[in-house]
Amino acid sequence: MSKEQRSFFRIDAMLPCSYRIIPSKEAQQNPLPANPDANYIEKYFMENLGELDEQINELISQIGTKSSILSAVLTAINSKVNFFLQTMDQDQLTHSIPQRMVNISAGGLAFDIPEKISNDDKVDLLLKPLAEEAPILVRCKVVKISLKGNINQVALEFEDVTEDDRRKIVYFIQTKEIEMANKKREESAAATFSRS
């Protein structure tokens, strides 16, 4: 198998992966830096949390028109969450990236999302394939969207991924391949042992 074919092997795996859908026009106006540092990634990730916080506050305000007690409880919970977020350092923040089942290769990945998305949109991914290394922030183009019930299965291709980041992704894939091969070997040995 050639090196090029090997690097594009696809594998299903759980991966710390957060995403933002970016309309095409916004993506053109706000390109990602070539080598985003930890501070940029933290700020970018916190911006996403900030937008979510605005949505939560708006919903709490709407709830307040119906039930002031429920609104007060939700406001207190939201304040507590905000306090914890403000005291997080970068390492803690990257550990909070949600685990997601993805189908990944060195050139892109696919996963399910509930939001509406179009082929013209871009998707920014925050990935942490290696626990001991910095996370990866990469912009992707939408290659394919398939509807699976009410969920969109989206295939993405990495744009302008650095060689260092691609190395992290390939190492992650190879590690998962080794884990799968070892598991099959153990299952085969166990099956052989139980027959004898």
Image (cartoon, helix red, strand yellow):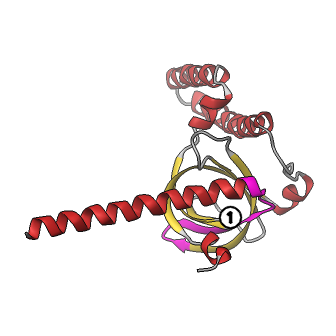
- Left or right of 192 in this view: 158: right
Quarter holding the C terminus? Answer: bottom left
The kind of secondary structure element at disc 1 is loop
Q: Could you tell me which residue is drawn at 19 percent across and 63 percent down?
A: 190
Quarter holding the N terminus? Answer: bottom right
What is the crowding at mark 1: few (fewer than 14 residues within 10 Å), some, or many (at least 20)? some
The outermost residue toward the right is 29
- Left or right of 190 in this view: 46: right
Q: Could you tell me which residue is drawn at 56 percent across and 55 percent down?
A: 172
Q: Quadrant of residue 166?
A: bottom right
**Secondary structure mainly formed by the magenta segment:** strand
Question: According to the image, label 1 marks what residue?
Answer: 117
Q: Which residues are magenta?
A: 147-164
Residue 10 percent across, percent down from the top left = 55, 70
Please say whether residue 138 is visible from this viewpoint.
Answer: no
Query: Mark 1 belongs to which amino acid?
Result: Ile
Residue 54 percent across, percent down from the top left = 70, 34
Q: Could you tell me which residue is drawn at 74 percent across and 53 percent down?
A: 164
State whether residue 97 is above or below residue 92: below
- Left or right of 160 in this view: 174: left
Q: In this orientation, which residue lies closer to the viewer: 4 or 136?
A: 4
Q: In this orientation, which residue lies closer to the viewer: 66 or 4?
A: 4
Q: Could you tell me which residue is drawn at 58 percent across and 41 percent down?
A: 97
Task: Based on the picture, tell me whether residue 68 belongs to the magenta stretch.
Answer: no
State whether residue 127 is above or below residue 37: below
The outermost residue toward the bottom is 1
- Left or right of 117 in this view: 73: left
Q: In this orientation, which residue lies closer to the viewer: 149 or 42?
A: 42
What count of labels does the image hold? 1
